[in-house]
Image (tube, grey):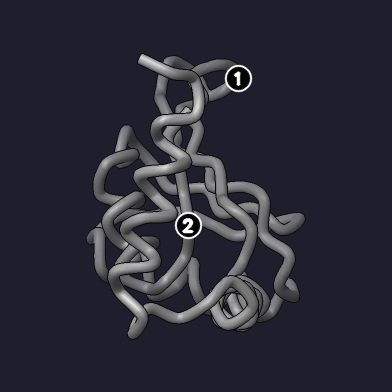
């Protein structure tokens, strides 16, 4: 198999489908989508310094503290748990990593569990 076989196959596919948008159109659309979204948020399980209890921390926000606080309030209500928002981070009581991930994805944030 030649090294550039995939390139030739891709070019043949693009040539046979003239209705596909060209390169610049794709870049313009992706730039519009990425500018309205947050960078990826990190969801961390923290165990130390809490008297043996665990907490789920969400960090990496670039929005204002008031918006983080509003999001934390919605998240706590949705998950049925306690928590707080301080210093651009959200703290949720307990190990709620998967539920927090689902909530953030449903609210159009990109997130990952660390």
Secondary structure beneath dot 2 equals loop
Q: Check the image and report above or below for 77 versus 98.
A: below
Q: Are marks 1 and 2 in contact (CB under 8 Å)?
A: no
Towards the viewer: 53 or 26: 26
Secondary structure beneath dot 1 equals loop
Q: Is residue 70 left or right of residue 9?
A: right
Q: Position of residue 51 (x, y in %)?
A: 49, 18
x 43%, y 54%: residue: 11
Q: Quadrant of the N terminus?
A: top left
Residue 11 is tagged as none
Q: CA distance from mark 1 to mark 2?
A: 28 Å
Q: Name the N-terminal-most of marks 1 and 2.
A: 1
Quarter of the figure with residue 38: bottom right
x 35%, y 55%: residue: 12
Towards the viewer: 83 or 37: 37
Q: Which residue is mark 2?
A: 110
Q: Position of residue 54 (x, y in %)?
A: 41, 26
Q: Is residue 66 left or right of residue 111?
A: right
Q: Which residue is mark 1?
A: 49
Examine the rendering and report whether any part of residue 32 can be seen.
yes
Q: Is residue 56 left or right of residue 81?
A: right
Q: Position of residue 96 (x, y in %)?
A: 30, 41
Depth check, mark 1 against mark 2: the one in front is 2
x 45%, y 72%: residue: 73
Q: Is residue 5 left or right of residue 89?
A: left
């Amino acid at each position: 198999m030649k090294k550039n076989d995939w390139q030739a196959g891709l070019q043949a596919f693009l040539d046979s489908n003239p209705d596909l948008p060209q390169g610049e159109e794709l870049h313009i659309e992706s730039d519009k989508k990425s500018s309205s979204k947050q960078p990826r948020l990190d969801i961390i399980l923290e165990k130390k310094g809490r008297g043996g209890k665990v907490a789920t921390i969400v960090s990496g926000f670039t929005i204002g503290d008031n918006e983080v606080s509003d999001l934390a309030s919605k998240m706590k209500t949705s998950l049925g748990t306690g928590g707080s928002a301080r210093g651009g981070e959200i703290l949720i009581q307990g190990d709620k990593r998967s539920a927090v991930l689902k909530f953030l994805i449903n609210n159009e944030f990109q997130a990952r569990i660390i």
